[in-house]
Amino acid sequence: MIPADHLLSRTLSDWQTRSDLPSAEAADVYRRFHRNGSHPAVCPDGRVVAAVQTEDATRKFLLTHEDGLQTESVIMPIEGRSGRIRHTLCLSSQIGCAMGCTFCQTATMGRVRQLTTAEIIAQWHHARHHLDAQVSNIVFMGMGEPMDNLDAVLPAIEILTDHNAAAIPASRIGVSTVGHAEGIGRFTQFMQRDGMHQIRLAVSINAGDEPTRRTLMPITRAVSMRAVRGAMQGWIDAGGRPILLEYVLIPGVNDGPDAASLLAAWIAGLPCRVNVIPYNPKVDSPWPAPTDHNVDAFIDAVARTGLPVNRRRTIGRSVMAACGQLGTA
Ligand code: SAH
């Protein structure tokens, strides 16, 4: 019997080179395992979906891995043009996170450990085959800092885009980072590979000025906003798609009268879209969620600077599945 992880951690061509099976047979096993969810020659994946929590049509699921630790992933419905429901799957790249952002629930766990490529792909596999999600988009916006685990994340993207596995086009895959400049550089190289040019980069900026960003995101002390901007410029210069700039709006913290213009001045000249995420309170949060009025006022202020801007829909808050609320005890 073939261990499931051998198929969860490899692209088809990689698997064919390593397998003892004749090439055509290896390909058949690989395709059927990924497309149907199982194969008689493959050991059933030992991971189990420990819990599924639902709010409206959003589902958060916990997957228990071999060492008993769990990842959290979120399945969000999106209605296509034809009215057909498809899903965006939000994947975790680590258990916990080392970045320490003060507004994020996951940060309170610290970094417990890296996920392997198989553990990342297993989240897709379970969403697709055990929870029947029609996954058309993937975002690395769950637990963890993907740029802190590129050795597992980049191979996972190759499997997600492999026509014989998940077959999700690179244009529908996005990776979000705290602004890990070196990681953005490596991701830029990856984007230049065949078939990867359309992949998306998102940067969580959360402030337009260094002092405010430092209070929210400790990484700012190691990687200045100037260095982040430099890495983003490198992405654009290499032909990368416009960048999604994520801005978690926290009342009284980063929604001051100058906040939008500081952001616009910092990013000036780089193709991007600002995505305003209304703050989702973490457990025992010192800050409330912004009111709709706060959010609209900030969005208007950003729009007045000329930057394209939109608001991220808040979903899953009641089951702690919204942005920044993932984190297991
Ligand atoms: N580490 C990566 C990816 C995970 S976080 C990153 O920082 O981008 C995904 C998004 O959720 C980030 O934009 C982050 O700023 C945002 N986020 C974190 N905590 C949040 C909260 N409490 N409310 C709303 N968004 C939050």
Image (cartoon, rainbow, N blue to C red):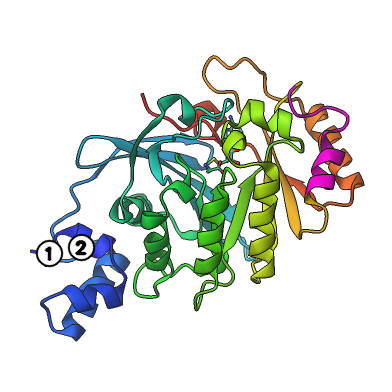
**Up-down: is 24 above or below 83?**
below
Quadrant (top left, top right, bottom left, bottom right) of the C terminus: top left
* Residue that numbered label 2 is attached to: 6
Tell me the residue at 69%/43% (across/down): 225
| Disc 2 element | helix
**In this view of the protein, which residue sits in the foreground, 191 or 319?**
191
How far apart, in angstroms, are the residues tagged by discs 1 and 2?
Answer: 7 Å
Asked where in the image residue 3 lies, by quadrant, the reply is bottom left
**In this view of the protein, which residue sits in the foreground, 305 or 99?**
99
Is residue 263 in the magenta section?
yes
| Segment tinted magenta in the rendering | 253-266
Ligand 1 located in image quadrant? top right
Is residue 256 in the magenta section?
yes
Count of marks overlaid on the render: 2
Quadrant (top left, top right, bottom left, bottom right) of the N terminus: bottom left
Residue 65, given in percent of the width and then of the height, sits at 25, 42
Q: Judge whether residue 96 can be spotted in this image.
A: yes
Q: Amino acid at mark 2?
A: His
For marks 1 and 2, give the one nearer the viewer: 2
**Up-down: is 327 above or below 246?**
above
Residue 22, given in percent of the width and then of the height, sits at 13, 84
